[in-house]
Amino acid sequence: MLKHIAVRPAGGTWVIRAGGAVLGESSRALELTEGDKPFVIFFPREDVAMAFLEPSPYRSSSAALGEAEHYHIASKSRTYENAVFCYTKPKPDAAEIGGYLAFDVQDGVAVEQV
């Protein structure tokens, strides 16, 4: 059974940091919830410094969302492997996130509301 998907505007302004550097800031981010999993913030590409992202050959898939492309983040201090994902052709329940970028929060990578 597929989990319930909800996409809505993420209130306020959100920022992405990697290795201390700000990679993006947006007041147009979207919040996706999938069942009882923690919400994920998706950023429009235009609000992210794409020069810091390197395409990865890695792909993942979700029964509810579809197939995701991944990117590495290249910061001054290190490379964060597969730390960014994007559903270019999401399933209909998540159509609004198509082409938006989400960041895997990990040591050195933070997504915060400011």
Image (tube, helix red, strand yellow):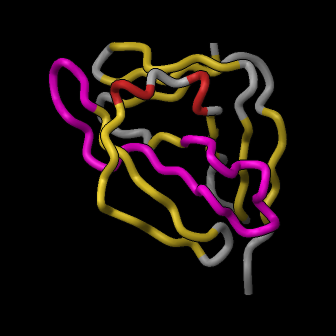
For the residue pair 63 and 54, the one nearer the viewer reads as 54
Nearer the observer, 25 or 6? 25
The span shown in magenta is: 74-101
Residue sticking out furthest to the bottom: 1
Q: Residue at x 81, y 65 (%)?
A: 93
**Residue 103 coordinates in the image, percent (x, y):** 48, 40
Looking at the image, the residue that sits furthest to the left is: 77
Specify the quadrant of the image occupied by residue 6.
Answer: bottom right
Residue 16 vs residue 31: left or right? left
Residue 45's quadrant in the figure? top right
Q: Residue at 24% of width from left, 23% of height from top?
A: 75
Is 10 left, or right, of 68 in this rendering? right
Position of residue 96 measured from the top left corner of the image (x, y, whole percent): 78, 49
Up/down of 14 relative to 98, above or below: above
Q: Residue at x 74, y 73 (%)?
A: 3
Q: Quadrant of residue 46?
A: top right
Q: Is 72 placed above or below 86 here?
A: above
In the image, taking residue 96 as reference, residue 107 lies left or right, namely left
* Image coords of residue 90 (percent x, y): 68, 63
Residue 84 shown in magenta: yes
Q: Provide residue 48's location: percent of width, then percent of height.
A: 52, 24
Residue at 70 percent of width and 49 percent of height:
97
Q: Nearer the viewer, residue 73 or 10?
A: 73
22 above or below 94?
Answer: above
**Residue 43 horizontal side relative to residue 10, left or right:** left
**Quadrant location of the N terminus?**
bottom right
Quadrant housing the C terminus: top right
